[in-house]
Amino acid sequence: MKYILFIMALGLAVNVSAQTDVQHTPHGATYRVFTHSTGDKIKVNDVITFDFIQKTDKDSILMSSFITGNKGKAQVLPIEGLKDIAEVNLMEVFPNLALNDSVEVKIPTDSVFKGHDAQRPAFFPKGSNLVFVLKVEKIQSLNDAIAERNAEMEKAKAEEAKLQANEAVAAAAYIASHKLVLKTTPSGLKYVITKPSLKLKPQKGDTLLVNYAGRGLDDKVFDSSIESIAKASGLNQPGRTYEPYEVIVGAGGVIPGWDEGLLLLNEGSKATFVIPSSLAYGAQGMGAIAPFSTLVFDLELVKVKPVKHPVVAKPAVKKPVHKKYPVKKKS
């Protein structure tokens, strides 16, 4: 909706200001200001926030702050060294803009790819332009921008601490309600081996085949390598081949809780891992897994495929040195 409103407003500005003069920068960019605000112009050491659309001459959008998933976020930019510009860029245009100004800027791609023509994409032929359409949403002093950023960081830290506390309470409640008796590693991984085995124990770098079912603290299964569990849980996984998952343990190809926990098992053993978010998907989450989510996995280490591990030489044992003392001669 914001994108549509911006385009509509820009279209109106273009129609009203159809005769807007095209301006040229010293280094070859051209620009048209569609709105002329009466406020102060952008200065060196200001920090500006602006929405933008980046496109080709043929209106193919390359990037936009209006489109979620396509860097869909207004850009924040400190304005530095306006007098020392040595190439064509937006910094040449910003000093001519004020708050709420909208502008179209065309930057010749011949200057962008000068000396790097092999990297020029097909949609930017010689003589074409990289086009920006942008609107200045905020102008701040550097100190004000820093203060705002610090306040946002403190707010985020407080919110993160609250979510982590909630996670710990929820995990404790889950463990108690399921009557789990768990061991805890120094990293925070909680686990119980439900079926011990005396078979081969994996080492870092070995390839493992693992069957698993992963669930949240609400007991809802979000993934499984076992078809019967997936179907019983209502998982829709079209094209999924249900077979043990292959992982090189300790290589960082899985969440840290798995990398650590699998090394505690033996081939043929089963276990339950209760993995805190710090050893799973953390503050970012993953797909349907919310940020700061403790995950529960029931696993079976089906097979260990060991690699050839280097033989670690045992330190040489030094033999004790017996000092020889002179024997006193009998007189």
Image: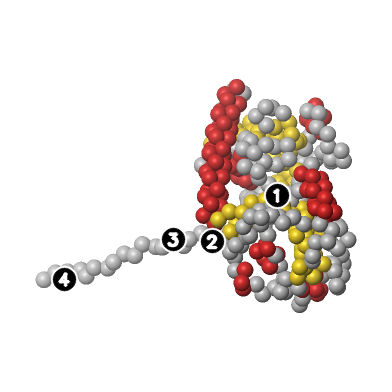
Q: Amino acid at mark 4?
A: Lys
Using the image, determine if residue 50 lies above or below residue 284. below
- In the picture as drawn, the residue positioned furthest to the left comes out as 331
Residue 29 picture location, percent across and down? 76, 69
Q: Residues within 10 Å of mark 3 (few under 14, many from 20)?
A: few
For the N terminus, give its image quadrant: top right
Q: Which residue is mark 3?
A: 317
Residue 92 picture location, percent across and down? 68, 68
Element under disc 2 = loop
In this rendering, the label closer to the viewer, 2 or 1: 1
Report, in whole angstroms, how far the alpha carbon at label 2 lies from the one at label 1: 55 Å
Q: Which residue is mark 4?
A: 329
Marks 2 and 4, the one that precedes in the sequence: 2
Q: Which mark is residue 100?
A: none
Q: Amino acid at mark 1?
A: Lys
Using the image, determine if residue 163 lies above or below residue 255. above
Marks 4 and 3, the one that precedes in the sequence: 3
In this rendering, the label closer to the viewer, 4 or 1: 1
Report, in whole angstroms, how far the alpha carbon at label 3 lies from the one at label 2: 12 Å
Labelled pair 3, 2 in contact (Cβ < 8 Å) = no
Element under disc 3 = loop
Labelled pair 2, 1 in contact (Cβ < 8 Å) = no
In this rendering, the label closer to the viewer, 3 or 1: 1
Q: Which residue is mark 1?
A: 73
Q: Which residue is mark 2?
A: 313
Occupied quadrant, residue 83: bottom right
